[in-house]
């Protein structure tokens, strides 16, 4: 099949754009990540004198780093439309997000859509596969206090013990409020067949768009972070507010990510931007913690029910292009999430200026010493 001039030009443009974007991403990482590390090193005395203020500053820097990642997708035309409950109204409370997992782009999508949710990003802890520890962003996540979990039966019990220890040591001491968890324990394409076989063997629903979640990490988080007196209470109407400010998880946010035509975005696409502009859809449903059972068997049933609902949500979305309305609504209401280009440019400029500053500092000391 002959390639037309127009097709060749399109391919050439895509390759050139991808190359330029990759170069920008590399430069972005080379200035931003070392700057983040060096700022934290310089601020170590503050950590000893005023730990809360130190972690506040670290959280701001962390949010800016995630904004840079979000900007790679935003400027490629990868945007987000949100559905369901408005999570902004619980952004100052403690919450756990339960998210379906289709591809590496899920993390980037969350980095983008949570940018406008108040203090959430800077006070958030991520639970992610240990392989992310060895990526360019791994050192940042380690310093921030995220937890890298190993998958597989051989590591399961040990990882849950390590998770509990990690939460006890780092969640409260670093003033974390939100924790993000992917309960499926892996990407949809990798776990679907195993999950369906398990469902068939145990007479559980046959799921196509999600997989059956694993209980372990969810149970550890609830045991470690839920206060003795649960205080999540729904307000009237569709709004959700927290009436009490005592410590402990107050909400569970069931988060469902949907991609057009069930074609998820991966990190390579997010960086290189070779896919056409795409709108990712994110659906939220907020549950007060008092509605989440504590007993393992009841919690398992509750968690399974959430993913059965995700299956229904995604089936509806792939058929209609929209999520169904919430209970009591005649029509589903969507909200387009936006980022300020000016703000993103300012953040990027600060990163490159920081890189230049640190380079000049090291160059000065090098000349002084040698």
Image (cartoon, rainbow, N blue to C red):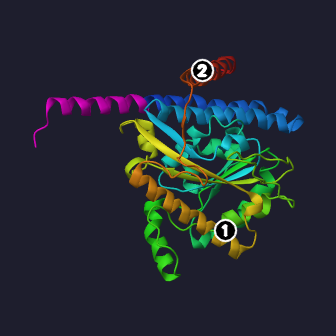
Residue nearer the viewer, 265 or 36: 265
Residue 135 visible in the snapshot? no
Of the pair 270 and 84, the residue shown nearer to us: 84
Q: Nearer the viewer, residue 44 or 193?
A: 193
From the image, which quarter does the C terminus lie in?
top right
Tell me which corner region of the image, top left, top right, bottom left or bottom right, holds residue 363.
top right
Residue 216, label in figure: 1
Q: Secondary structure at mark 1?
A: helix
> Is label 1 in contact with label 2 (beta carbons under 8 Å)?
no
Which of the two discs, 1 and 2, labels the residue nearer the N terminus?
A: 1
Query: Which residue is rendered at x = 80% and y = 57% of the image?
Result: 168
Residue 23 position (above or below residue 370): below
The disc placed on residue 346 is 2
Q: Position of residue 333 (x, y in %)?
A: 55, 43
The magenta stretch is 1-22
The kind of secondary structure the magenta stretch mainly shows is helix
Quarter placement of the N terminus: top left
């Amino acid at each position: 099949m002959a390639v037309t001039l127009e097709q060749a030009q399109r391919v050439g443009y895509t390759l050139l754009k991808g190359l330029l974007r990759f170069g920008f991403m590399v430069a972005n990482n080379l200035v931003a990540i070392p700057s983040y590390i060096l700022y934290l090193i310089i601020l170590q005395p503050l950590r000893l004198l005023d730990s809360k203020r130190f972690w506040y500053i670290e959280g701001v820097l962390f949010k800016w780093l995630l904004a840079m990642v979000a900007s790679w997708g935003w400027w490629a035309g990868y945007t987000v439309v949100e559905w369901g409950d408005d999570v902004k109204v619980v952004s100052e409370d403690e919450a756990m997000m339960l998210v379906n997992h289709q591809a590496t782009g899920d993390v980037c999508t969350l980095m983008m859509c949570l940018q406008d949710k108040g203090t959430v990003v800077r006070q958030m802890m991520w639970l992610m596969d240990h392989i992310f520890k060895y990526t360019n962003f791994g050192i940042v996540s380690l310093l921030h206090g995220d937890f890298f979990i190993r998958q597989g039966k051989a590591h399961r019990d040990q990882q849950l013990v390590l998770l509990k220890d990690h939460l006890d040591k780092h969640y409260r001491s670093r003033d974390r409020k939100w924790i993000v968890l992917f309960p499926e324990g892996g990407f949809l394409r990798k776990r679907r067949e195993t999950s369906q076989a398990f469902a068939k063997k145990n007479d559980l629903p046959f799921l196509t768009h999600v997989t059956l979640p694993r209980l372990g990490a969810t149970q550890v988080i609830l045991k470690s972070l839920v206060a003795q007196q649960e205080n999540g209470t729904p307000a009237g109407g569709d709004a959700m507010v927290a009436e009490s400010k005592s410590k402990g998880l107050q909400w569970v946010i069931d988060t469902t990510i949907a991609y057009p035509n069930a074609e998820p975005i991966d990190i390579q696409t997010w960086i290189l931007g070779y896919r056409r502009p795409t709108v990712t859809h994110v659906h939220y449903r907020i549950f007060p913690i008092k509605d989440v059972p504590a007993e393992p068997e009841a919690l398992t049933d509750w968690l399974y029910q959430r993913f059965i609902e995700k299956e229904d949500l995604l089936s509806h979305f792939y058929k209609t292009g929209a999520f169904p309305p919430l209970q009591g609504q005649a029509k589903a209401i969507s909200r387009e999430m936006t980022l300020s280009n000016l703000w993103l440019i300012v953040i990027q400029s600060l990163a490159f200026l920081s890189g230049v500053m640190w380079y000049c500092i090291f160059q000065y000391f090098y000349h002084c010493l040698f």
